[in-house]
Image (cartoon, helix red, strand yellow):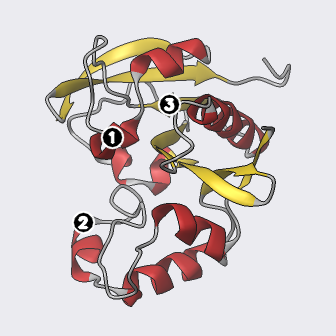
Amino acid sequence: MVIEVRPAAVFDDVRALVGPKRDDASVCWCLSYRIPSKVNNAMRGQERGAFVAKLLEDGPLGVLAYDDDTPVGWAAVAPRADTTFARNRKIPHVDDLPVWSVWCIRVRPGHRGEGISHALIRGAIDYARAGGAPALEAYPLDNAGARVDQTMAYAGLRTNFEAAGFRHVADTTSVLSGHPRVLMRFDLDSRGD
C-alpha cells in the first residue's frame, strides 16, 4: 500500500472521514476547534456539512491520506489564530510566533495500524510549511503507553509526534479521556527538514 497525503480540498473526501453516516446526524465534522463554540453548538444535521462545504470554498481544511483514490485518513491543520486554540486558556501560548496547529488525526477503521497517522503528521508538516508557517504545534495526549479510546485519540499521541520530530514545549492543563495533553512543536524552515 502506498499512502499519498494531499490537501483536504474535496468535500466528498472530507465528508468520508469526518462527516456522518446519516445526513441528519450532528457529528463533529471537525469543527469544534475551528469555529466559536456558540456557532458550533447551534448547527445541526445537514447544516454542519453545508458549513464545511462553504469553508472549503476558501481552501483546504488540512490534509487527507489516500490509498489510491480512497481517502483513509484526515488531519485538521490551520493557523492557530484561525482556531479556538487562539483563545484557549488550557493550552498556553509559548511565544508570539504565528504558528499553525494540527489538532485532529483520524484514520478510517480497517486502515489503522498501517502507519497512516504518521503519514498524516508528515503531511501536516509539509502543508504548514507550504502555507508559510514558522512552526507547527500539536496538542496530543501524553498517555504514557496506556490504552486510549479510539474516539478520544483524535488529538493524537505524544509518541507519534515525537517520532515525526516534534519536541515537547509545554505542559497544558487540558485533559482528554483521562490523559493530559502536552504542547509539542515542529519548527519549520526553508530547508525542508
5 lies left or right of 35: right
Position above or below: 73 against 182? below
Q: Nearer the viewer, mark 1 or mark 3?
A: 1
- Per the rendering, the mark at residue 37 is 2
Label 2 element class:
helix
Comparing 152 with 166, the one in front is 152
Label 1, label 2: how many angstroms apart (C-alpha)? 23 Å
Residue assigned mark 3: 137
Give the amino acid at mark 3.
Glu
Mark 1 in CB contact with mark 3 (< 8 angstroms): no
Image x and y of residue 99, in percent:
55, 36
- Per the rendering, the mark at residue 42 is none
Image x and y of residue 92, in percent:
30, 29
Mark 1 in CB contact with mark 2 (< 8 angstroms): no
Q: Quadrant of the N terminus?
A: top right
Residue at the spot 34% in from the left edge and 53% down from the top edge: 84
Label 1, label 3: how many angstroms apart (C-alpha)? 21 Å
For label 3, the crowd category at 10 Å Cα-Cα, with few meaning under 14, some 14 to 19 and many 20 or more, is many
Image x and y of residue 188, in percent:
70, 24
Residue assigned mark 1: 150
Give the amino acid at mark 1.
Gln
